[in-house]
Image (spheres, grey):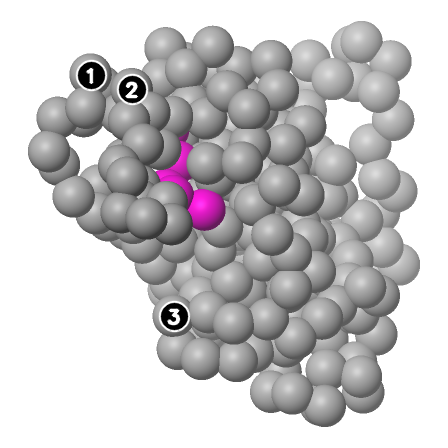
């Protein structure tokens, strides 16, 4: 109920500012606020979107009496991707005193199968589990543990491709792959010849290891970003 009240208030505030909300789908009975609320609720619970939605049609019928078919639910979310991004930024609280950036693969297909889907600029990359076809998400996380900026890049993207995301942030931590991105503090690294290059990391984090990977892995798994099943680019954008 708290999520619904927050979403409904946000939508009313946007309408009062002159923002046009997406039109209702044909024969759509559930309101936009109800459908966005359910999507956010399922994601914050860590549930699979499709399975959770089907279960909600039965278990949450008292709260959502007129839920449409799953395919129509997806179409509504796709049309409302701008609203979802706005709500995500509002929920995260925006920029903090300390930011963390990383690259996270979003595997959608294996190898050549990526070309059979409607996914522009998708590319084959290498992730923790080997080669994958799809995209990488470059999110920036604040100290609340939530993303407030992000970019969706081809699967073969390098860290330097997202330098604009962190260009105006005062304090950003990243892994060693970001050592070529100006303004990002990374752990010390060795160059050819064995010389250790100090980066200012120890002043922030001391000798903590794998801190970035742990925080991002928790967030990615809690939001189900490691098991997205999208067959179109805009469906993927809405889901992210």
Horizontal and vertical percent for residue 138? 55, 45
Q: Which tag, 1 or 3, sits closer to the chain's start?
A: 3
Answer yes or no: is residue 33 visible.
Answer: no
- On screen, residue 71 versus residue 100, left or right, reads right
Q: Are marks 1 and 2 in contact (CB under 8 Å)?
A: yes
Q: Distance from label 1 to label 3 (Cα)?
A: 29 Å
Q: Is residue 176 above or below residue 186?
A: below
Q: Nearer the viewer, residue 111 or 75?
A: 111
Q: Nearer the viewer, residue 234 or 109?
A: 109
Label annotation for residue 11: none
- Residue at 31% x, 54% y is 217
Residue at the disc numbered 2: 200
Residue at the disc numbered 3: 128
Q: Is residue 187 above or below residue 6?
A: below
Query: How many residues crowd around disc 2 within 10 Å: few (fewer than 14), some, or many (20 or more)?
Result: some
Q: Which residues are magenta?
A: 173-177
Residue 32, image quadrant = top right
Which residue of the protein is positioned furthest toward the left in this rendering? 207
Residue at the disc numbered 1: 203
Q: Distance from label 3 to label 2 (Cα)?
A: 27 Å
- Residue at 60% x, 87% y is 110
- Which element type, helix, strand or loop, lies under badge 1? helix
Residue 68, image quadrant = bottom right
Q: Which tag, 3 or 2, sits closer to the chain's start?
A: 3
Nearest to viewer (mark 1 / mark 3): 1
Q: Is residue 234 part of the magenta span, yes or no? A: no
Q: Nearer the viewer, residue 32 or 163?
A: 163
Horizontal and vertical percent for residue 169? 53, 15
Horizontal and vertical percent for residue 176? 38, 43
């Amino acid at each position: 109920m708290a999520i619904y009240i927050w979403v409904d208030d946000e939508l009313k505030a946007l309408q009062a500012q002159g923002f046009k909300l997406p039109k209702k789908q044909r024969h759509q009975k559930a309101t936009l606020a109800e459908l966005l609320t359910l999507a956010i609720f399922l994601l914050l619970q860590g549930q699979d979107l499709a399975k959770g939605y089907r279960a909600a049609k039965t278990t949450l019928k008292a709260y959502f009496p007129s839920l449409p078919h799953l395919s129509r639910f997806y179409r509504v979310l796709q049309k409302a991707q701008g609203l979802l991004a706005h709500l995500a930024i509002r929920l995260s609280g925006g920029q903090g005193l300390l930011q963390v950036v990383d690259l996270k693969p979003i595997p959608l297909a294996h190898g050549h199968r990526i070309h059979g889907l409607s996914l522009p600029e998708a590319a084959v990359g290498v992730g923790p589990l080997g080669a994958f076809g799809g995209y990488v998400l470059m999110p920036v996380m604040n100290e609340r543990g939530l993303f407030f900026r992000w970019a969706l890049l081809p699967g073969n993207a390098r860290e330097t491709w997202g330098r604009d995301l962190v260009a105006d942030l005062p304090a950003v931590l990243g892994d060693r792959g970001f050592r070529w991105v100006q303004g990002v503090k990374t752990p010390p690294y060795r160059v050819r010849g064995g010389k250790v290059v100090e980066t200012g990391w120890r002043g922030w984090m001391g000798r903590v290891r794998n801190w970035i990977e742990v925080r991002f892995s928790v967030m990615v798994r809690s939001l189900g970003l490691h098991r997205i099943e999208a067959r179109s680019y805009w469906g993927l954008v809405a889901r992210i």
